[in-house]
Amino acid sequence: MSQDMREACLQDWMDREAIAESMIPLVGTMYRKKNVVTSIYGRPVINRSVIDLLKAHRFVRHMEKQELSVHDTFPVLAALSELDVGRAHVDIGKLAVKYRTEGNGRDLNAFLTDELSDVIGKDLPDGENRDVVLYGFGRIGRLLARILIEKSGGGRGLRLRAIVVRRGKGDDLVKRASLLRRDSVHGTFRGTLTVDAENEALIANGNFIKIIYAGNPAEIDYTQYGIKNALVIDNTGVWRDEAGLSQHLQAKGTARVLLTAPGKGDLKNIVYGINHGDIDAADKILSAASCTTNAITPVLKVMDDAYGINSGHVETVHSYTNDQNLIDNYHSGDRRGRSAPLNMVITETGAAKAVAKALPALKGKLTGNAIRVPTPNVSMAILSLNLKKETTVEELNNYLREQSLHSAVQKQIDWVNSPEVVSTDFVGNSHAGIVDAKATIVNGTHVNLYVWYDNEYGYSRQVVRIAQQVCGVEYPTFPKVG
């Protein structure tokens, strides 16, 4: 390589770095002042570094088979910042590519005004009940807290007002704060965290979060803390039917309850992106189903739409959970008493049958089983499907890639086509499931699909999407799909 080429490579990097640096304040200002959430092909850019921004652009070449540069997205972002945009989720990467391919010589401002006409000069009304209470503070509870704090923006989104726990031994507040601040799987908390011992609260990125100590949901009076019409997200798993969860509705200040586990009985099990339209104003108690059901249902939906599913089997390779034992000990469940870090453990899963609650067309068509494996997070579902019509590996992968980019389930389905990825590469992925294209197997009408999912974070993002809907703070997404 010549000296001139080396200098040119370095100069190009420095130029792109400088542009990325100038994008950061625009992204932040639009988020805090206009409640506009920006992304690049689904990858978040709010509160991200220069390197994160550049990597998000680089990612696009794997999906669209064309390069995307800050030279393409910066003009889009700059123009957006000058427009009167209401609350929205705007993918500046997809808009830049769309302008490149469909702009037809139009001025960028005119193009953006047409694309975002639904929110230009308009703003969606705020929901009446935006207060959120987390009942329980385990793995899912702490991730929900992180997401809700990160999404607080200009204060017009969901508001995490309180966390309900049983008082532990020792300095409980400090220990709770430490678990929120540091996570062995998901890394450190993005922001600042202060313990307010006098008021028994945590202050996270300016959000005052009351810690309420209680053992009975019905005994709490949330209104004494200024909380009203709250959505209580129960992530304890202690109660999973209407009778048990109704205890939350007896508490003053509670409007609705959302369970982060499969609901029993007649409770609606909601997989956002699939059957969230079934949520009625009269529904007081909802379930967000399971992490596995959320991972597989969107993929099964698009497969059934395009090819038809006659039958299938779902095998879940699932990371161990807190329900299992560290070392061999008594457990009420079969096999789960054996040491989780040392064994693969065959166990049952209701995810295959639960799919039918969100996708009735597949009722009775799927069987399922699960294997717990010695990893702390990120799982995989292997979908072995018998289709109604034949396909090929190339056709099927292209179809699933397109669904991940430009369909109504683009936030639920992600797609990867790398021969090197392993489970830890998907820690923190916000999608419900990620199709591994390199692993796809097709034999006429029989296919095997391998779907990764962050069973903690990806699922928690699905829970928050439901919470945003029931609290009336949804963000319309641009560019539009379908």
Image (spheres, rainbow, N blue to C red):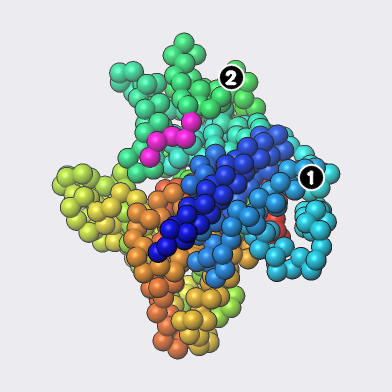
From the viewer's side, name the closer residue of 197 and 314: 197
Horizontal side of residue 393 vs 18, given as left or right? left
From the viewer's side, name the closer residue of 136 and 364: 136
Q: Which residue is mark 2?
A: 225
Q: Secondary structure at mark 2?
A: helix
Q: Could you tell which of marks 2 and 1 lies nearer the N-terminus? A: 1
Quadrant holding the C terminus? bottom right
From the viewer's perspective, is residue 442 above or below residue 255? below
Task: Locate residue 269, reporting x and y percent.
Answer: 54, 54
Q: Please tell me which residue is depicted at 56% across the width and 64% down the height of the picture.
A: 67
Q: Which residues are magenta?
A: 187-191
Q: Please tell me which residue is depicted at 47% across the width and 54% down the height of the picture.
A: 7
From the viewer's perspective, is residue 262 above or below residue 203? below
Q: Which residue is mark 1?
A: 83
Is 450 colored magenta in this rendering? no
Q: Is residue 335 visible?
A: yes
